[in-house]
Image: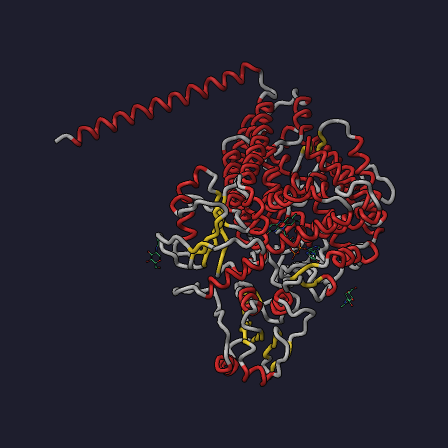
Amino acid sequence: MARRYNRAASGLSEQLKKYPRHVAGLRLTLWLLLLSSAAEAGLYTGSDQIVALSPDNVKSVLVNSSSAMVVEFYASWCGHCISFSPTYKRLARDIKEWKPAVDLAAIDCADENNRKVCVSFGIRGYPTLKFFNAYSREDSAGQTFQGLPHDVQALRHHIIDLMEKHQDPWPPACPPLEPTSQAEIDILVETNSIRHLALIFEDATSYIGREVILDLLQFENIAVRRVLSTEEELVTKLGVTEFPSCYLYSPGGNFTRLKINFEARAFYSYALQGLPGVVRSGKSTPATTNPISKHTEDLWRHFNRSRVYMADLESTLHYSLRVELASHPVIAGEALTSLRKYISVLAKYFPGRPILMNLLKSLSSWLQDQTGDQVSYQALSEILENSAQAPDTALPEGVRWVGCQGSQPHLRRYPCGVWTLFHLLTVQAKKSGGSDPKEVLSAMTGYVHNFFGCRPCAEHFENMAKESLMEVKSFSEAILWLWSRHNHVNNRIAGALSEDPNFPKVQWPPPDLCPACHTVKDNGDHKWNNQQVLLFLQNFYSAEQILTDYLEDESEVLAKQKVKLQQILEAQKRVGREAREITSPHNLPPPTQAVVEEEEEEEDEAVGDEEEEAVRDGGAAAGGKTFEPTPWARGETKRQNIRRPPSIVGKKMRDAQEDIVDLDSFVNQHHKAKAVQVATSSRVKQRTLQRNREERDGLGLVGPEPEFGSDEAMRVQKRELSARFGGGAGSGRRGSWMSMLSIGFSKVDVSLCVILYVLSSMCLLAMYLFFKTRLRLRRVKVSLP
Ligand SMILES: Cc1cc2nc3c(=O)[nH]c(=O)nc-3n(C[C@H](O)[C@H](O)[C@H](O)COP(=O)(O)OP(=O)(O)OC[C@H]3O[C@@H](n4cnc5c(N)ncnc54)[C@H](O)[C@@H]3O)c2cc1C
Ligand SMILES: *[C@@H]1O[C@H](CO)[C@@H](O)[C@H](O)[C@H]1NC(C)=O
Ligand SMILES: *[C@@H]1O[C@H](CO)[C@@H](O)[C@H](O)[C@H]1NC(C)=O
């Protein structure tokens, strides 16, 4: 996923280069406007998993829907609605897995646009909850909830009651909710059609069985049924004495009791969803061996799922600082403040290796020293690459994902690393005893807001921050805040395309990882033991627990850095040399040189290693090693090369004014070069398009992101247009050709040339017009009778 987001981000940066800055500024403002207006509308945001109804979608959502719908009619000014909204949001998270059977929606009747809809449903008081059957007709008014319960459990039970009374047609995704019998189970066992069968024994008044049935409705290879305690035959056969309790049928032919800490809904659901072979419908069964080797040549690095790896954290820093930031050529204003905070938090709390800490510290103090209101990424990257050659200072290059490996290249990786990094920092900040409990969280929100490539993620995250970040008052609360927001995200995107089937999204840590973290309320609902969660997180994300497997040796890192700096120097020399060679008149630089070179480089990249791939992930192609005056700005500079031959070339040309140019060979070269240029640029264009298409296809897209894609398409189009109509490549080169034209000719020669050219074109135009009118005249004659 990271690769998509970051490609998109770097696409934006390319655009930034081509278009005047104010255009980009405008885009940003528009985007912010959109964001704030979305946040202001009503009591719910897009992050709440509640469908927002409006006159435009009310029919398509309520009429003929394959799931039943619960709709809240509210007025955003009404106090009761405001106090009910957190409950409704919690309900949405609580029954998220039931969506295909019953979904939640809401409509703000205080919004003028929605008045008609609310009136047509006869709404007088707020909030009003209504239940609509699946496949409702257009004239259906829904069933009104009598007495609005203010707790999630009561609402959930009420919804189950309504579902049980649901008339035909039954929502197809909803499994049967009624109690099962010995006879039905005999059939299920005999046909042996399912891998797992779970029976929940309970009293008639208990809702647990039905809740678990609905919790698992999106999962395959498992069936859940409820058995009443009055079903004597089964109860005695299995010797069931406790209600509720859960028994699993195993293919061997007998039932075994499911072992869990609490006989409660959440614990059953956790355990059943995690059974071997149980997968979300539509997700492939997780492969057990080497899932990644199919797609790339990378080796799967074995790791312990209950540990944090330094390799992931260093990879995250590499990606964040060298790739994600690189798509911001100039960092100014609020973004610069955020960057300062982010780097300062890293320098203070990141428990890294000495070489990396030295680098983070020098980067942080450099940033604090910048008194201007902006810094260029170029300047920042010189610090990143340690071009001052301070001893024992380096940011390891490239990515090596370990605990964040995905079963496919587009899954997990960078976003997984970002979460891990920030959880770690909240825990480290508490240990170090800073002064501001919100320091890390505000650094994170700032980074996410300004730089995180996944814009929809950033938007969701900001919604959450706006809602509750101000409640954080201590370091412990900061740790728990981030933990619980991460769980909200896990809840929201469980089952999304971006979910790795090998790493299903669960409310974390699951009971098998931290049994003490889970407990139950008096009413039997699940409850986190926050004190235990805090202890667990502090241990899980403690510096001592971080594993250093798969890390590159410090000495190797330093040696590589040296080689890189050496290459930079050589490249600079070479550029100088080539520029000198160019001064010889018969060696005019074919303008396509840079483009051709790029092509070769790309072919090299195809066989590159994972590190290079990661850089490409960010849309910034790996830096060319030979033709780059400043390889730090990776990729970006290369494109500049194409657009503008190095400026030294121009200077040398002017020095060589005395040389005489052979006009024929010049014209020849000029045209040949033009032809090659056109051919290559169209090839490059095709490739860009194709790559863009691949990106879009290969990516697990989640949530409402169509704008994302179309935006990108627009960008591609614009890039093409500007290439064709001289915005980019053409104009720069034309400038230098013009200056070359003047070599060896007097101004009079040139102007004569121009006059002749204009005259001949006018002549051609006249001939064209002449023949055209003649043709028209002929046609008119023909059409006469
Ligand atoms: C700020 C932010 C917002 C995002 N928003 C979206 C979004 O809106 N839509 C979307 O599709 N993707 C979003 N993502 C990406 C998504 O959250 C995952 O990072 C990505 O899908 C990779 O998932 P993963 O399986 O590696 O686990 P991740 O969720 O990335 O978790 C990484 C590791 O952290 C640990 N962990 C898991 N849960 C918790 C927890 N609650 N507390 C502490 N540690 C935990 C686990 O060890 C886990 O392996 C966002 C990422 C970030 C950083
Ligand atoms: C609802 O679905 C039925 C059958 O699928 C169809 O005949 C009917 O036209 C649909 N009505 C609307 C309003 O879409
Ligand atoms: C993984 O780490 C946990 C926690 O440190 C440990 O208890 C467990 O034995 C480890 N598992 C493996 C397979 O090493």
Closer to us: 638 or 229: 229
Residue at the limit of the structure toward the right, as seen here: 391
Does residue 398 lie above or below 740 as drawn? below
Residue at x-position 54% and y-position 57% = 155
Snapshot quadrant of residue 12: top right
Quadrant of the snapshot with the C terminus: top left
Closer to us: 563 or 514: 514
Closer to us: 283 or 565: 283
Residue 35, position as x, y percentages in the image = 56, 38
Residue at the limit of the structure toward the front, as seen here: 147
Q: Is residue 595 left or right of residue 112?
A: right
Q: Is residue 547 left or right of residue 155?
A: right
Residue at x-position 51% and y-position 43% = 707
Q: Is residue 170 left or right of residue 208?
A: left
Residue at the limit of the structure toward the top, as seen here: 748
Closer to us: 454 or 491: 491
Q: How is the image coloured?
A: secondary structure
Does residue 228 lie above or below 751 as drawn? below
Does residue 71 lie above or below 182 as drawn? above
Residue at x-position 67% and y-position 28% = 647
What count of labels does the image hold? 0
Residue 669 visible in the snapshot: yes
Residue 184, position as x, y percentages in the image = 48, 79
Residue 648, position as x, y percentages in the image = 69, 28
Residue 114, position as x, y percentages in the image = 43, 41
Does residue 704 lie above or below 549 as drawn? above
Residue 694 visible in the snapshot: no
Snapshot quadrant of residue 31: top right
Q: Is residue 535 left or right of residue 723?
A: right
